[in-house]
Image (cartoon, helix red, strand yellow):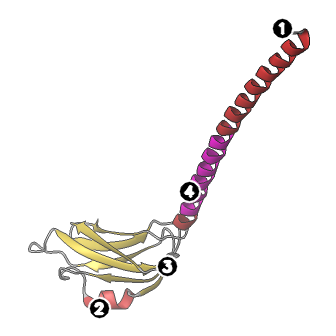
Amino acid sequence: MTSFAVGSGEIIAGFALLFSIYATFKTIQFNNRQQKLIVTQEKLNQLLLDKETSVIEFEKQAELGASFLKLGSNKYRVKIWNKGKAPAQDVSIDFPEGNEIVSEREINEKFPLQFLDVHQAVELIASVGLSTKSKHLVKLEWSDGRALRVEKLIWITI
């Protein structure tokens, strides 16, 4: 018959083995959390990069608008302005549903406009009478920092 005697060395070795298993488990848990943190950090960096890219793209864009201005009792103007962050180039105007408010001569003298700087505007003399429609569709086209020519449809009202 063999007797099995456990000495203090075996007890210490057993505790060392258990502690080693526990430490390995905790290290694996830590590495998994670290990997999740790295993935989250990469996503955050990508979002920040996308945001900065869109801000830079926005800084290259002109934003044109149009409206009627009333000057005095019977004097009207159609005002075209640039409220964007960049100048507009080769600006053109069209009235897709017909033009009964601005003379063709007035349009041909001012458009196509080679350059419309930031916060700059151009006014066209408008002829408004009792039979004039109250709203008109204006199509503006221009070039700016974007790859393609920009087209914008705006309803202007008297």
Q: Residue at x 30, y 77 (%)?
A: 139
Judged from this view, the residue extending furthest toward the left is: 131
Q: Tell me which numbered mark, 1 or 2, is placed earlier along the sequence.
A: 1
- The answer to which quarter of the image holds residue 75 is bottom left
Which residue, given by chain and number where applicable, does mark 4 sit on? 51
Give the answer, above or below, for where 69 lies relative to 151.
Answer: above
Q: Secondary structure at mark 2?
A: helix
Instruction: Look at mark 1 in the image and give the residue it sits on.
Output: 3
Q: Which circle's residue, 4 or 1, is located before the other in the chain?
A: 1
The residues tagged by marks 4 and 2 sit, at their Cα atoms, a distance apart of: 45 Å
- The part of the chain drawn in magenta is 34-55
- Residue 107 or residue 73, whichever sits in front: 107
The quarter of the picture where the N terminus appears is: top right
Task: Residue 142: give x, y in percent of width and height.
Answer: 42, 80
Q: Earlier in the sequence, mark 4 or mark 2?
A: 4
How much space separates mark 4 and mark 3, taking CA atoms? Answer: 19 Å
**Disc 3 designates what residue?**
147
- Provide residue 76's location: percent of width, then percent of height: 26, 72
Alpha carbon distance from label 3 to label 2? 31 Å
Q: Which amino acid is tagged 4? A: Lys
* Numbered circle sitting on residue 105: 2
Query: Looking at the image, is 155 positioned above or below residue 29?
Result: below
Q: Earlier in the sequence, mark 1 or mark 3?
A: 1
Mark linked to residue 122: none
